[in-house]
Each structure stands twice: as structure tokens, then as C-alpha cells.
Image: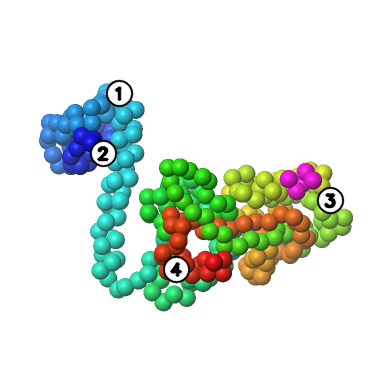
Amino acid sequence: MSTPFNYKHLYYFWVVAKEGGISRAAEKLDMAVQTVSAQVRELERSLGYALLKPAGRGLVLTDAGQAAMQQADQIFQLGENLPARVRDAASTPTIRLAIGICDGLPKLVVRRLLQPVIAEPNLRLLCHEGEFDDLLGDLALHRLDVVLSDRPAPLNPNIKLYSHAMGSSTIAWYGTATMTRAASQNFPASLADVPMLLPTAHTAVRARLDHWFEQRAIRPRVVGEFADSALLKTFGASGMGVFPAAEWAHEDLLAHYAVQRLGSCEGVTEHFFAIGTEKKVQHPLVQRLLQPAL
């Protein structure tokens, strides 16, 4: 059994590390410098490792201190959220759904994926956009109920995650009237002659698009790459270049952006997944999201 330690000592260490010194931490905590210093030493003694070392006029973290700080960040960030969570639970009954959205996932597709729960009268929807690995980490810590992504969760023996297919969409090329007119002759070979906007390499569909170009011996003239799909479409609608988009959201795309469909990206499909921590989904709203796929 591991040696127990005092969470108050951990908190004092956390404040010292964030403030960069014991004096500043003592001022923030309204405590004596000697008291704060003694509390940190007690933590180091209980853990068996030095967590801080002198650097100039301040202190920096040792390697052990870095590891302790990462854990302390998670612990006290969760603690800071506790009053709000308790208050929300005691107020008007709501159904809370915290969703992580991968930054490369098309926003119009996200809206369509969430359509089954939007009309829920007691819904409190919390949407967090971020990178795939960061969102999976938040999911594993139960900060999120589900993550929407363009790829399934990777196999990880330390974290059990389950990927539920939500559907897929063919990809087509879009652009302004001027762009589509310039590329309409001899399509798709004409894509080599017009400026092009593409998603960045961290999206799952980018590798499929690159393979599609290679198969057809097309060397695209890429003038922009975007991690955010909405930003890609915005620049495409401004006339910067043609761009790929999921046909699943075709009507919404034409309604929100001044673009036209140029032609199909035949053979390229974008897939959508809901990733959770349960093999059998328990959250009623996540069940509703998955209903078409179940």
C-alpha cells in the first residue's frame, strides 16, 4: 500500500509551483512563508522525492515535481468545478450532455449529428472543441460524456474506450461560381489548374484525399490548409480556392456559404464516430444520438 499524503500539503505545493516561489505563494495564501515551506517539505517527505529546486531567485519543478504538478492540476481543476456541479444538480432539473468535438470535424456535420437531441426541452449542451488526443484524455477523466470524431479511438490497454459508428458521407468538391466554372472542363484533371484549400494532415480524411490525387496523377496547387473545417469553407466561399466537403451536409453548405458543387471526389468517404467509455451506452441522450446506428 502506498504511503498516504496530505492533500493540503499537495495544495500548498500546487500554489507554490503556479506562483513560482514560496514568498509569492505565501502572500496568495495569506500564510507565513515558513508555514508554506514546511508544508511543501512534508509533502516531499511523504512522497520520498524533491519536487522543487532553486533557480535564480525562484524555484522550478524537478522531474518528480513535474509529474506531481500534472496530477495536482487535474485534482484541483476538478475541485474548482465541484461547486458549480453541485449548484447545477440542485437547480432546475436538466439533462446535461458534455460533448467533445474534434477540431477537424465539419461543423455542419456536427450540427446534423446532434439534431436528434437539440429539441430536448431540458437539455444543457456543453460543447468542447479540441484535438483528438486531448479530448480522449478528458473523456477518460469523465469530463466529457462522448467525443465526436472522424476516426475511431485507438487501441490503448490503459484506457478502455469504445467507438460507435454514426454514419459516413461521400466527399465532393465545392467552390464559388467563378471557381467551379474554371474547373468544370475536364474535371477532375482540372483540379490541378485551380487553387485548392485542404484540411490539415491531422484530419482522417486528408490521407484519403492525398491518395485520391495520387491515383489520378493530379498535383494540386494547395494555397491553404485549415485545421478548422468552418474556416476552410469560409475562405473557400471568399473565392480563395476549391475545397472538399462532406455531401451529407450539402443543403446546409449551400444555404450557409455562397458556393456550388463542382463534382464528386469519387471513392473518398468521411466517417463519423461517437467515442465513449461504455460498451453499452447508458447516457439517454447519447443513446438517442446513436439510435440510427444501433
Is 51 rendered above or below residue 164?
above
Q: Position of residue 262 (x, y in %)?
A: 77, 61
Return the residue at label 1. Answer: 55
Q: Earlier in the sequence, mark 2 or mark 4?
A: 2
**Which secondary structure, mark 2?**
helix
Q: Which numbered disc covers residue 14?
A: 2
Question: Against 119, is 199 above or below?
Answer: above
Q: Which residue is mark 3?
A: 189
How many residues crowd mark 2 within 10 Å: few (<14), some (14–19), many (20+)?
Answer: many
Q: Please tell me whether mark 2 or mark 4 is closer to you in this view.
A: 4
Q: Between tags 3 and 4, which lies in front?
A: 4
Q: Residue at horizontal 23%, vertical 36%? A: 1
- Which class describes the residues within 10 Å of circle 1: few (<14), some (14-19), or many (20+)? few
Question: In the rendered structure, which segment of residues is drawn in magenta?
Answer: 211-215
Q: Amino acid at mark 3?
A: Ala
* Residue situated in front as seen by the camera: 98 or 242: 98
